[in-house]
Image (tube, rainbow, N blue to C red):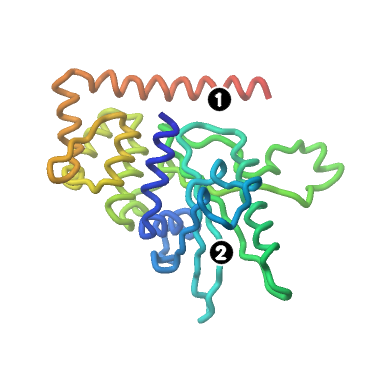
Amino acid sequence: MAKEKDRAAKNFFSDPKIFSEFVNLSLFNGEERIKAEDLREIDPVNSTVFTKNKSLEVLVDNLYDSTVKESDENVYAIIGLESQAYSDKHMVIRAGIASLLIYDNQIAIIKEGEKLKPVYIIVFNMLDRKWSNATDLRKLLSDEAINAFGYPLVNSGYYVLDPHELKGEKLNKISKPLKLVLNIIKNQGDKNALLSYINSEEAFKNLDYRTAKLLETIMKVDIPNDGGYNMCKAIEDIKNDGKLEGLLEGKREGKREGKREGKREGKRE
C-alpha cells in the first residue's frame, strides 16, 4: 500500500501548478514565489542526466528545475520531492545521497566560472501522524563529540511538508486539489473531523483523476467515476455496507502502532 501511495503522489505532483504550490508552502511559508511556468520537470527514472549507477528513482519521486525572480535576475535551483507513506529514519541519509548525486551531475557539465544550482529536498508526510524523524544529520550526532571536534563539514538534511502542522490560513491560499489532499491527511486519524470535512466540501463530488487516485490510496476506498470521481458517494457506500468504522479503526490502530514503534526505536537508540 505504501508503494501505491507513493506512485499516486508522484503522479499528483507531476502537475506543475500543484508542485509549485507545494514548494511555496514548504520553502516560502505559502508566499507565491514559484509559479507553474517557472518549473521544468526532470524525470528521475527516465532522465539521461544520471547514469545507471547513479539512479535517483529510489531516492526522490519528483524532480524539477526551478526559477525565481530576484532583483530582476533569474535565480535557479533544483527541487526534489519524496512522498512518504511510511516512517523512514534513514530519510536524512537518502536526502543527502540524492542531493550529492544532483550536485555530482552539475559538476560534470558545469562550465568554468559557473556556480552550482542549490538542491532542496522536500519530504511530503502522508502518515496519519506527525513526522518524527530527524531532518538534519547534525541532530543525530552526540553533543560530546561535537564539543570535542566541532561539527563535520559534511551535513545532510531535508525540509518536511507535514499536513498535521499546517494551520487553516495557509491551507486557504492554495487550490482545491492540494487543499483537499492535505486536509484529508490532516484529519484521517479523527473520524468525526474527517467525515465533517468530506461532507462540507462540494469538491469531493467531482474530483479530477489525479486527486481521486491519490485519495483512494490514502483513504483505502474505491472512488466511483460517474462523469467525475465522487468521494462522497464512496464514503456513503462504505457506510451502507457497515465498513466505515472498520476502515477508520484500522487507521487508528496504525497510528497507535506507529507511536509504539517510535517508542521502541527510542529505547533501542
Q: Residue at x 31, y 29 (%)?
A: 220
Q: Identify the image quadrant of residue 136.
A: top right
Q: Which residue is mark 1?
A: 262
Q: Residue at x 19, y 32 (%)?
A: 234
The quarter of the picture where the C terminus appears is: top right
Give the mark toward the camera: 2 or 1. Answer: 2
Q: Identify the image quadrant of residue 85.
A: top left
Q: Which residue is mark 2?
A: 77
Q: Secondary structure at mark 1?
A: helix
Q: Secondary structure at mark 2?
A: strand
Q: 191 above or below 173? A: above
Mark 2 vs mark 1: which is more N-terminal? 2
Q: 237 above or below 207? A: above
Cα separation between marks 2 and 1? 34 Å
The residue sitting at the bottom extreme is 72
Question: Considering depth in this image, is 18 or 255 the residue closer to the camera?
Answer: 18
Question: Considering depth in this image, is 88 or 266 the residue closer to the camera?
Answer: 88
Residue 23 % position (x, y): 46, 56
For residue 6, which numbered disc appears in the image?
A: none
Residue 21 % position (x, y): 39, 57
The residue sitting at the right extreme is 148
